[in-house]
Amino acid sequence: MQLHIETSNGIPIYEQICRQVKFAVANKALQVGDHVPSVREMAGRLAVNPNTVSRAYRDLQADGVLIPIRGTGLAVTPEAPGKCQSERLDMIRERLRLVLAEARHNQITPDEIRQLVESELQRLDALEDENASQLVTAEETA
């Protein structure tokens, strides 16, 4: 699990950690029962204050994403995947609402919005196909 902290985006670091752990669970990069790095280890990896990581982990426990396992640390709960997938969809839905509201405010028609969405989805599909073929080529030459 690789986390990336952006200090200039206005989102508190502890919240960025929470979001990224939840996305890792939603994307199955973290599975039920997997342990997250210790507070000290995560703070060192991210070059942040251990208290910041500790706060994020407390919030994740309060949200039912992590549970303490005596003697071994914090692990992903059985309920976490469903919760995290639902939260991820809610966050994406909210971002989409903001983009759609901006488009409508700028008099972009629903048909134009649909065309934009379709063209961007096609572009993303093409990029994914290109990345997959590059990965296969790299594996073949290795």
Image: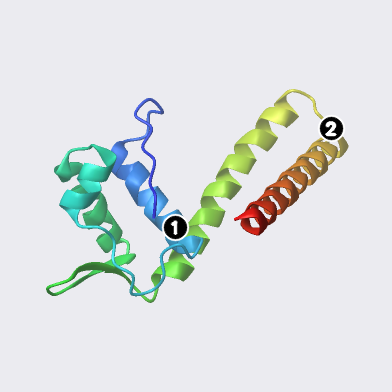
Q: Which mark is residue 109?
A: 2
Q: Quadrant of the C terminus?
A: bottom right
Alpha carbon distance from label 2 to label 1 = 35 Å
Residue at left offset 31%, top offset 36%: 12
Name the residue carrying label 1.
24
Vertical order, 77 against 41 (above or below): below
Q: Secondary structure at mark 2?
A: loop
24 lies left or right of 141: left
Q: How many marks?
A: 2
Q: Earlier in the sequence, mark 2 or mark 1?
A: 1
Picture quadrant of residue 21: bottom left
- Looking at the rendered structure, the secondary structure element under dot 1 is helix
Residue 28: image location, x then y, percent: 48, 65
Vertical relation: 112 (above or below) 78:
above
Pointer 2 with pointer 1, Cβ within 8 A:
no
The quarter of the rendered structure image containing the N terminus is: bottom left
Q: Nearer the viewer, residue 100 or 36?
A: 36
Q: Residue at x 28, y 43 (%)?
A: 14
Q: Amino acid at mark 2?
A: Thr
Q: Could you tell me residue 85's position as x and y percent?
A: 51, 62
Identify residue type, mark 1. Answer: Ala
Left/right of residue 47 with respect to residue 135 in the rendered view: left
Residue 109 in percent (x, y) is at 84, 32
Q: How dense is the environment of label 1, judged by Cα within 10 Å: few (below 14), some, or many (20 and up)? A: some
